[in-house]
Image (tube, rainbow, N blue to C red):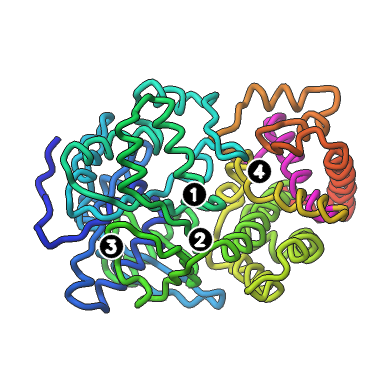
Amino acid sequence: MALSHTPGADERIILHIGTGSFHRAHQAWYLHKLRETGTDDDRKWSISAGNIRSDMNPTHEALASQGGRYTLETVTPQGERAYETVTSITRVLPWSADLASLVEAGSWPQTRIIAFTVTEGGYYLDEHNHLDPSYPDLAADLEGGRTTIYGALAAILDARRQAGAGPVTLQTCDNLRSNGERFHSGFIEFLDKRGLGELKQWVEANTKSPCAMVDRITPRPLPEVRARVLEATGEDDLCPVMGESFIQWVIEDHFVAGRPAWEKVGVELVESVLPYEEAKIRILNATHSCIAWAGTLVGLRYIHEGTHDPEIRKFAYDYVTEDVIPSLSPSPLDLEKYRDVVLDRFGNPYIQDTNQRVAADGFSKIPGFIAPTFRDCFARGATPAATAMLPALFLRFLERWGAGELPYEYQDGVFDPAATRAMLGSADPVEAFCADRGLWGQLAGEPKLVLAVRTAAGRIDQWLASRVASGKQHA
């Protein structure tokens, strides 16, 4: 499948895999601002965007019909809305099962960066950064498939190597701790298992994978977004996105084939992203999940509703204050201020971010966002009572799922429904939950973990009963 819009000699291209809302509200927006406000040299950079899977095809085709242009709606906590036409995506690559357009674009020498947003679960990594081939998609790719980021990049980079197109940076933009390092580790292991020795050597010599921290709350756009865009701009945009006004991107400045001058538009280029990502993952991401699971259990639909519920807000506040801040101190960030800013952002009623979206992928979020604080607390001899409320909320959430009582479909890229039902149906679900190595790694089965989660689950049961008794439970 040849592409009609091949690049000119002086173009500099970011090939981005994953055209979902977050990429279009975050990375694509930053490049758009640079192209709008920068120099002629800055305007040489553009995005060619495609997908590995077909589930985004309706949105992707709508984006293609608009030439890659779309409207971004942002909203402040005070309800002030702004609209901007984002134009940094100049090529929308057609999807096919063989990923031919991605392979072709990745083989262009003008492609300097291959970036991707595939969600936390899309890396299939355990706590030791090893691949878990029990996942069918990964197992298929280890046999030659192209359905994961590893299989896709193996095909893209092998074509690039054979074309002599030169070095390229591989840039993950997902909420994964040490995301660049962990991706690189997983990819090298994948190439080893596939027996792709020559490609492995080329990757090690010709790529870099900088770590990064990304942040902007970006809910799935509801039909009302399209209606507001039409009213505000007169454009009937088929694929608008919306997000909060806050935005942040911190990147390790480790690129192998050049990069846009993102620092001109507020991106923080640093030597190490570690303190920023630890604060973001443990405070923002874990707290987000806490509020989503708790809000779902009491019948709320939106994140802002749970954030303004005093009892749910206290779960989140106590978790950060009692366990996370001591674990991350000392820090170059003002962690108490960061906590308060995060809760203010979650309380924005105009975002209309759903519990369904944020509650997803719990089987990736427990090991990535929450288990590290347990380890830190146990290491310093502290009892993580506040942290234990989060996995206990998730367990009660899963029990609702198992009983068919969730108000929405639970979406999780890596959980095993049959194994989860077996866990819930065991003689001691708390013990079985805490014994899951995929969730807990080396903490699995730890008596202190079991006791903490069991105690927290009892607190949640009392809390839910009190909500019913006081009439606070929503339908």
Is 209 displayed left or right of 230 in the figure? right
Q: For residue 459, which numbered disc appears in the image?
A: none
Q: Which residue is mark 2?
A: 213
Give SS at disc 1. helix
Q: Which residue is mark 3?
A: 258
| Comes first in the chain, label 1 or label 2 | 1
* Above or below, 382 relative to 137: below
Amino acid carrying label 3: it is Gly
Q: Which residues are magenta?
A: 384-407
* Above or below, 109 relative to 121: below
| Comes first in the chain, label 1 or label 4 | 1
Crowd class of label 2 (few under 14; some 14 to 19; many from 20; radius 10 Å): many
Place of residue 251 in the rendered image (x, y in percent of width and height, measured from the top left)? 45, 64
Give SS at disc 3. loop
Amino acid carrying label 1: it is Glu
Q: For residue 181, which numbered disc appears in the image?
A: 1
User: Which mark is in front, 1 or 4?
Assistant: 1
Place of residue 331 in the rendered image (x, y in percent of width and height, measured from the top left)? 67, 70
